[in-house]
Image (cartoon, rainbow, N blue to C red):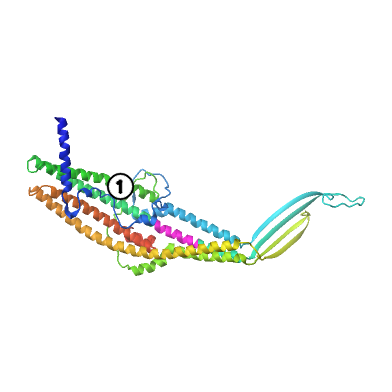
Amino acid sequence: MLRLRKLTSIPFAASALLFIASAAPLGGQSYAGQAQFTVPTSSVSVSTTLGPQSPFLGSVPTGQPTGSVISLSLSDALDRGLKYNLGLIESNLDTRTARAQRLKSLNELLPNINAAITQSAEQVNLRAEGINVNIPGFPMVVGPFGVEDARAFWSQKLFDWSAVQNLRSSQKNQQASDFSYKNSRDLVILAVANAYLQVVADRATIESQQAQLDTSRALYQRAVDQRTTGVAARIDELRANVELQTQEQRLISAQDQLGKDNLVFARTIGLPAGQEFRLTDTVPYAPLQGISVEKALQDAYMNRADYRSAQLQVQAAQFSRKGAVAENYPSVRSEVNYGDIGPNFANSHGTVAAAASVNIPIFQGTRVRADILAADTTLQQKNAEMEDLHGRIDQEVRSAFLDLTSASELVRVAQSNRDLARETLGEAQDRFTAGVTDNIEVVQAQESVAAADQAYISSLYTFNIAKVQLARSVGIAEQAVKTYLGGQ
């Protein structure tokens, strides 16, 4: 009999679940499709800007865990990200490489000065040198004798137009690298702000799910009490129990997502492994006023560090091509040395030698033609990349405004819908308590509240990250994000 009851209870519970799932909930959404609300979804894709394997999602952790929970405001997180984020560290190293290349190009035009002190002792066999003098008493072996010499050498290219153009190119590349570093700082701001907002959204989701779980637990207990007193049917208790366990699943999923996003956030700002932290800013809804698309586009072309860098890279490529052409031009070089020489420094005399030479290229094979072709190819590539970036900036700014406008409306609608869903849940609870209806309406209303809460959290995340994207697209992320999000 026990085995028979187990077999028959399974289809009964399954039938109850199917019956609940088949009930059309409020808002036109299916009950079965509302099981996951833990990850904020957004049309604003930060991963498109950074890339899934971006170094801006990593860091160089420093220090050891403190053993206590540290408090982090948005401003603290941004400042820490600007110190320890891997993408910014790598960008700084690229800047140093560009500076080294400029110094190397500059060295081609600077004088080279060396000094040397030599002392030598020699004994010369004249016959070995081809000198054969048949004079009685004339020595065939001379020496030993010593020579001491202290001398300074100076050499410099007096004129090399190719080296001048290459120096100008390397200077532009260094300036471009400096702007790339500034652009990297904006990308760090974007990555850290996104990670911070993600954790804030996860915490809000957990609070919402916990509230839903408490409500479900109370409603389940009410259904049990009513079934015990004979007011409600067994199916009402089953529905309430299924809803309770569904909310528990959602809470577990939300807690798991928070743990993962905490790890991502800690990696982004370089916290020591295992360091516990607490976020202090909730980043509420705050409308953004006084910004137009036209003004934002104008500011973007002036402020975007990556666009300034692209312009400088084009100029560097132009100078590189001129340098390749100038390899056919004559160059002038000078060399001077001055020193003191003699058998010893007590019996020595100063000597000097100076020379200037003009190198006139006549035939250098195809090397110069190849250099010009390569430089011209690079110039065309840099021009194409700059024009593409020009169009991409326009797209990013306009997209940011579209996201900001739509997200603002979504927040407004989601907030209103959340209030209505909670009011509907209250009405459904009263009807069920009064015995007017079963608890199908209550379950549907609970699902609507859960969906409305998650829609509000998601829309708020979307709105805030859209403001960050707008600041990034205009090129003022480092200066404006704290103000846009209300961080201090």
> Which is nearer the eye, 345 or 284?
284
Query: Which residue is rendered at x = 50% and y = 66% of the image?
Result: 315
In this picture, residue 351 sits left or right of residue 242: right
Q: In the displayed structure, would residue 352 be above or below residue 217?
A: below
- The reply, left or right, for residue 359 in relation to residue 391 is right
Give the percent coordinates (x, y) of residue 47. Answer: 36, 54
Q: Position of residue 467 (x, y in %)?
A: 32, 61
Between residues 336 and 70, which one lies in front from this camera angle?
336
Residue under numbered circle 1:
257
Give the camera-side residue of 3 and 135: 3
Tell how many labels: 1
Seen at 12% across and 42% down, the residue is 235
* Residue 178 within the magenta-colored segment of the rendering: yes
Is 423 colored magenta in this rendering?
A: no
Q: Quadrant of the C terminus?
A: bottom left
Q: Residue at x 74, y 51 (%)?
A: 119
* Quarter of image, res 1: top left
Most common secondary structure along the magenta stretch? helix
Q: Quadrant of residue 298?
A: bottom left
Q: Which element is circle 1 on?
A: helix
* The residue stretch that appears in magenta: 174-188
Foreground residue among 396 and 212: 396
Q: Where does the image place residue 314, in percent across and percent down from the top left?
A: 49, 65
Circle 1: residue type: Gln
Please say whether residue 90 is visible from this viewpoint: yes
Residue 172 at least partly seen? no
